[in-house]
Image: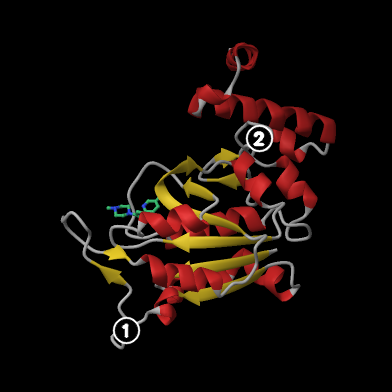
Amino acid sequence: MQFTILTLFPEMFEPIKHSIIERASKNNLININLINIRDFSKDKHKHVDDTPYGGGAGMVIKPDVVYDAYNSINDENAKVIYLSPKGKTLNQKKVKELSKEKHLVLLCGHYEGIDQRVLDEIVDEEISIGDYVLTGGELPAMVLIDSVSRYVEGVLSEDSTKEESFSNNLLEYPQYTRPEIFNGKKVPEVLTSGNHQKIDDWRKEQSLITTYLKRPELLNESEKELAKKLLN
Ligand code: 4H7
């Protein structure tokens, strides 16, 4: 899968070239291409922004610079995503959907945003990572890359993507490791029993109970009833 990032701050993406994505990058499963929008500035001072028509605070990124940066990619089949607070909120269903794409272009805004005319011209989808304000679209782009990359064939074991939170609409069960006793607290006995059927059942119950206590809105009525019974 190919990610192309259009940004004024390419240095911000250094960290995601490491971590979980590093193995995927080495195996050529994922390729990240950074384009500095400033490289397409038309003037000798490398300006990319200007004052907003109609007045008001801050600066707006110029449409022609973004358009030229986009056209340098030269892939008509790439899906262009604009990371902005006006977008649809990202969730795991959307993440899985996006992981089926061959090429995603992530457009990162800054300052007061980007001139609307070029957005109307090139953006396929507007996505937000949640209802809060950030200084730029770079962190949302990294969140999207991290979450989507996990679903790219061969990046993670199938087990880890199948079993996890949200894939089955439940939160994950609690995890334990050595020592068997920590600060006087013992690991739940079932986990050291060696009975895999019992362990499986216990984990499913714990998932349901955890979800009921922390995020009840994720459950339907019969799941909530079952969780209540398990808690008695
Ligand atoms: C695009 C358009 C995404 C990018 C506007 C981006 C939150 C999210 C940005 C803006 C982002 C998210 C302009 C919004 C200036 C904030 C004060 C950069 N913030 N800005 N405003 N939730 N900010 O995904």
Above or below, 185 relative to 21: above
Left/right of residue 67 with respect to residue 220 in the rendered view: left
x%, y% of residue 150?
Answer: 67, 55
Residue 166 at what x, y percent from top left? Answer: 62, 37
Determine which of the numbered discs, if any, sits on residue 131 in the image. none
For image coordinates 70% across by 63% down, the residue present is 1
- Disc 2 to disc 1, C-alpha distance: 66 Å
**As rendered, which of 91 and 51 lies closer to the eye?**
51
Choose top left, top right, bottom left or bottom right for residue 30.
bottom right
Q: Is residue 28 above or below residue 138?
A: below
> Which quadrant of the view contains residue 32?
bottom right
Which of 173/13 is in front?
A: 13
**To which residue does mark 2 refer?**
188
Mark 2 or mark 1: whose residue is earlier in sequence: 1
Q: Which residue is mark 1?
A: 43
Describe the element under mark 1 as helix, strand or loop: loop
Quarter assignment of residue 91: top right
Q: Secondary structure at mark 2?
A: loop
Left or right, 154 with respect to 104, comes to right
The residue at 50%/45% (across/down) is 183
Residue at (53%, 55%) from the top-left corner?
Answer: 81
Name which residue type carries label 1: Asp
Task: State the colouring used for the structure image.
Answer: secondary structure
Count every numbered label the image shows and give the total.
2
Image position of 219 (left or right of 193): left
The residue at 39%/78% (across/down) is 38
Furthest residue in direction bottom, as rendered: 44
The x and y percentages for residue 132 are 35, 45
Q: Quadrant of the C terminus?
A: top right
